Amino acid sequence: MAVFTAVSLDDLHQWIKQYPLGQAVGLEGISSGIDNSNFFLNTEHGPHSGQYVLTIFENLRFDQLPFYVKLMAHLAERGIPVPAPVPNTDGDLVVALHGKPAIIVSRLQGSSQLDPQPVHCAEVGRMLARMHLAAQDFALHQPNLRGLDWWVETAPAVLPYLSEAEAALLRSEVAYQSEFAAGATYADLARGPVHADLFRNNVMFEGERLSGCFDFYFAGVDTWLYDVAVTVNDWCVDLATGVLDAARVRALLDAYHEVRPFTDDERAAWQPMLRAGALRFWLSRLYDLHLPRAAELLTPHDPTHFERILRERIACPAPNLP
Ligand SMILES: Nc1ncnc2c1ncn2[C@@H]1O[C@H](COP(=O)(O)OP(=O)(O)OP(=O)(O)O)[C@@H](O)[C@H]1O
Ligand SMILES: N[C@@H](CCO)C(=O)O
């Protein structure tokens, strides 16, 4: 059960008066999710037909939230289907509830598509390109906190837990990515705010139509191509082997390219970037498994899935960018 802070309708009676939503009339804990406490919240009125999600942040502090929450607001205002944060009557998007930071956002309709077909991948590619363009003029800046600096700093902490073969792969891949990131091709890549965690479980579909995406809490400024690589590594793989499915890759990349054409520098950087996207999640999963934070709440994800993907990307070139 992923509700770590208990909340009742009674608790909300006074608290919700700071919002232009009327009284809370329904509150139901959401069982998935491992970082935060989430609730479906129904209110008497409000711009989203009274249908909201209340999130209480279990690990992020107030000062860590503006980049993520304002980015969601920025994207929602530009028509990207992301949860729109609701301001209270003082204009604040993040407020305290039971002493922790909390937000109310619009509820997205639909459900996850965990067995995506090319048609779903095309929707994801199109939306990702629209999101990159819409975020270009976002005023706040925060680097990708799970980027190269974090890999270099974190790899030594997990090395003692690895087999010889795993440790050799991790060391050589961090070295490879450091060299790649120091090169001229990398420096010329387009960049801006990126989602950086656009996995299947963070996107909603109604039938074949993408109805929204959420979980912006790993967002940061990085190359757009990195975001594409992270997305392809999840949406277009065979989960058992990590092998890419060419039809899904084509669908996602072609749809992205139609909205925001890839550049020659991006074509040159594509294969290393897919490896970067695999390394990031292998390392974060290793870190969560072997060095769990005191406040870590549920079972970590399996690191070997991304080790397999990384080995596969090194051994076998992916379909090229259009
Ligand atoms: N705006 C929203 N509209 C509809 N459903 C939502 C919304 N936000 C979150 N959810 C639901 O809540 C669940 C948990 O949300 P989320 O993934 O953001 O939680 P989390 O604790 O940050 O999880 P994790 O870190 O595992 O991704 C989602 O799987 C989704 O079903
Ligand atoms: N998408 C991440 C979890 C953090 O949201 C993973 O699969 O490791």
Image (cartoon, rainbow, N blue to C red):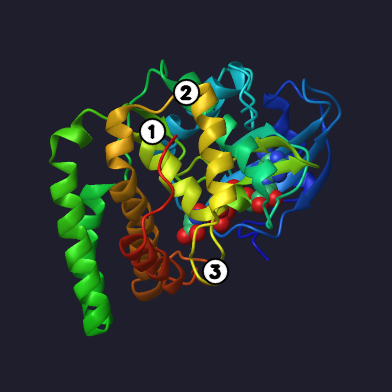
Asked whether residue 38 appears in the rendered view, the answer is no
Which of the labelled discs sits on residue 298, or is there none?
3
Q: Mark on residue 260?
A: 2
Which structural element holds mark 2?
A: loop
Real-space Cα distance between discs 1 and 3? Answer: 31 Å
Quarter of the image where one finds residue 5: bottom right
Dot 3 crowding, Cα within 10 Å, few <14, some 14–19, many 20+: few
Give the amino acid type for the residue marked by disc 2 in the picture: Arg
User: At 70% from the left edge and 60% from the top edge, which residue is drawn?
Assistant: 31
In the picture, the quarter occupied by the C terminus is top left
Question: In x, y percent, where is residue 115?
Answer: 69, 57
In this view, 39 is above or below 195: below
Task: Tell me, for residue 195, which label it has, or none.
Answer: none
Mark toward the start of the polypeptide (1 vs 3): 1
Q: Is residue 282 above or below residue 266?
A: below
> Dot 1 lies on which element?
helix
Is disc 2 in contact with disc 3, using a CB cutoff of under 8 Å?
Answer: no
Give the mark nearer the N terminus: 2 vs 1.
1
